[in-house]
Amino acid sequence: VNYFISRKCNYACKFCFHTQKTTHHLALEQAKLGLRLLKDAGTEKINFAGGEPFYFPELLGQLCKIASNDLDLAVSIISNGSLITREWMEEYGRYVDVLGVSVDSFHDATNAAIGRGEGPNSNKNNHLSRIFKVREWCYEQDIIFKVNTVVCSKNWEEDMTDNIRKL
């Protein structure tokens, strides 16, 4: 089951179907009830997504913990990677089986054109350097790391083979 925590996201990817229409998300108790109902209906795997699920790190962490510990569900997360922290991974990583991150290009200018990251001249957290950090944190926590890519008009000619191998 794909469980969308919220539609809220810190990026503005031009191809994303999940444009923010609301910032609503369930309170933890309501979300726990939803997970229990899904388990009772036969769910074996839960994938937390969004918007950006790490926009609400405490809620996401608690849901991962409940899904894994209390409900014995396989847990995965799909994220743009930008809001993941080492602290979150150290506290909640043990409850996550798979973490997928979005990598649509290995060029800052292309990422900026797509709406992902801050562009080549920014001194903010660079999307690509974050992805490599997240990959390392997954390795440290024994989490399977996977890459999601949307091929679009901005990146279709890019050969990402060498950089994907580095990940």
Image (cartoon, helix red, strand yellow):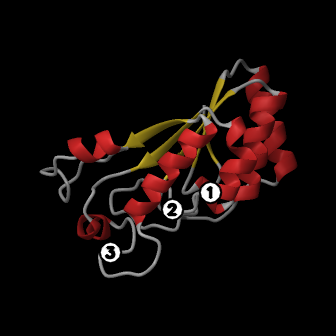
Name the residue beneath numbered marker 1.
54
Amino acid tagged 3: Gly
Residue at the left extreme?
157
> Where's residue 54, x and y in %?
62, 57
- Residue at 27% from the left image edge and 47% from the top image edge: 163
| Disc assigned to residue 119 | 3
Numbered circle sitting on residue 107: none
Residue drawn at x 79%, y 47% as measured from the top left: 62
Looking at the rendered structure, the kind of residue marked 1 is Phe
Q: Nearer the viewer, residue 97 or 19?
A: 97
Where residue 110 sits, quadrant-wise, is bottom left
Query: Element at badge 1?
Result: helix
Q: Residue furthest top?
A: 42
Local SS, label 2:
loop
Q: Is residue 104 left or right of residue 82?
A: left
Q: In the image, which disc is placed on residue 82?
A: 2
The percent position of residue 132, horizontal first and vertical second, equals 43, 53
Residue 105 higher or lower than 126, as above or below: above
**Rendered residue at 69%/61% (across/down):** 24
Q: Earlier in the sequence, mark 2 or mark 1?
A: 1
x, y (%) of residue 12?
42, 67
Circles 2 and 1: CB distance less than 8 Å? yes
Is residue 21 found left or right of 65 in the rendered image? left
Location of residue 113 (image quadrant): bottom left
Query: Left or right: where does residue 48 sit relative to residue 151?
Result: right
Residue at image x 46%, y 47%?
101
Which secondary structure, mark 3? loop
Residue 69 percent location from the top left of the image: 81, 30
Type of residue at label 2?
A: Ser
In which quadrant will I find the C terminus?
top left
Front in this rendered view, residue 67 or 129: 129
